[in-house]
Amino acid sequence: MATDTVKLPERPHEHAMDAVGTEPVRPVMSFYVYEWPVRIWHWLTALLVVALSLTGYFIASPPASVAGDTSALFTFGQIREWHFIAAWLLTIGVVFRAYWAVVGGEHARLIYYVPFWSKQWWSDVFLVVKWYLFLNKGEKWVGHNPLARASMFGMFTLGSLAMVVTGFGLYAEQAGVDSWLRGAFGWTLSLFGSSMALRTWHHAGMYLLLAFSAIHLYAAVRDDIMGRVSTVSSMISGWRTFRDFHDE
Ligand code: HEM
Ligand code: HEM
């Protein structure tokens, strides 16, 4: 089955048994959702966001000076170096993931646009909001639920792109005036008005991504337990399994 918002039949147990006789229900109610490049990209990105936030935090609030020869210790230099290594890897990931949205399956495209124009989408969002407010038993979504999709698009897809653009803007500042980096990203300085403003927005972007990560983790674990669908393991195996169904 290959759609992100499949509604289950009213009595899915019976439906499943009709379809497969005495076979176990599982093959019918598991859906392959996340292709392996998406899964590997996901976990690497999660790690990189943690590494960039930690090193970024220290760049903004440097640790107190330690006794010893600064050039020999090079502690702050190393913090920056790790930030830049992780930054390049994240950027490669952002580009690769966008490429995969084009060549991958239909689920790989979901976090790149949101169908705001669709009435159905809004009524689905309403159902999900009620689910998170404990007001209904929840629907089963094969891919991301519509609210998750919107927050992934707004907070992560656009958020990570903004981090790459502002990050390279700061990086370009330190590169030579005639470097390709300055040529490619120098415009960010004039766009934001000053180096300080650019830095502040880059910093604010970190909190956006951290807020996303916190909500994301809560929702993933909550859906796994309360929603009776596999979520965390789906991002490991690629398969989404509906563990049981409400019959009423
Ligand atoms: C998840 C992504 C990222 C996070 C959370 C993050 C976080 C941060 C933070 C909090 C700062 C300190 C800002 C301040 O001084 O207030 C910083 C600085 C910086 N970041 Fe990032 N960053 C990310 C991605 C990137 C990327 C993709 C680049 C691209 C090269 C980059 C390049 C830089 C540079 C050049 C600085 C300034 C370093 C300095 O002045 O010593 N960052 N980052
Ligand atoms: C241990 C921490 C994490 C866990 C357990 C986790 C788990 C998951 C799960 C289960 C999904 C699929 C959700 C669904 O089907 O609706 C997912 C998707 C996603 N996660 Fe995470 N995640 C973690 C950390 C992160 C972090 C730190 C980020 C980035 C800030 C992130 C970004 C994403 C994105 C962008 C997707 C959509 C993937 C796609 O469709 O390409 N995740 N995550």
Image (cartoon, helix red, strand yellow):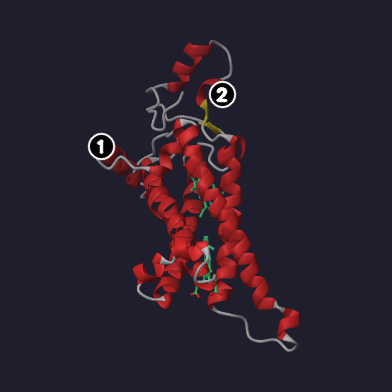
Dot 1 alpha-carbon crowd within 10 angstroms: few under 14, some 14 to 19, many 20 or more: few
Could you tell me the amino acid type at mark 1? Ser
Query: CB of mark 2 within 8 Å of CB of mark 1?
Result: no
Q: Is residue 131 left or right of residue 217?
A: left
Identify the image quadrant of residue 201. Answer: bottom left
| Residue 87: image location, x then y, percent | 57, 60
Could you say where residue 112 lies in the image, as x and y percent from the top left? 40, 43
Q: Residue at label 2?
A: 26
Q: Residue at x 56, y 46 (%)?
A: 42
Q: CA distance from mark 2 to mark 1?
A: 32 Å
> What is the x, y in percent for residue 100?
51, 38
Residues 121 and 140: in front is 121
Q: Is residue 15 above or below residue 55?
A: above
Q: Between tags 2 and 1, which lies in front? A: 1
Residue 248 lies in what quarter of the image? top left
Q: Which residue is mark 1?
A: 118
Asked whether the viewer can see residue 167, the reply is no
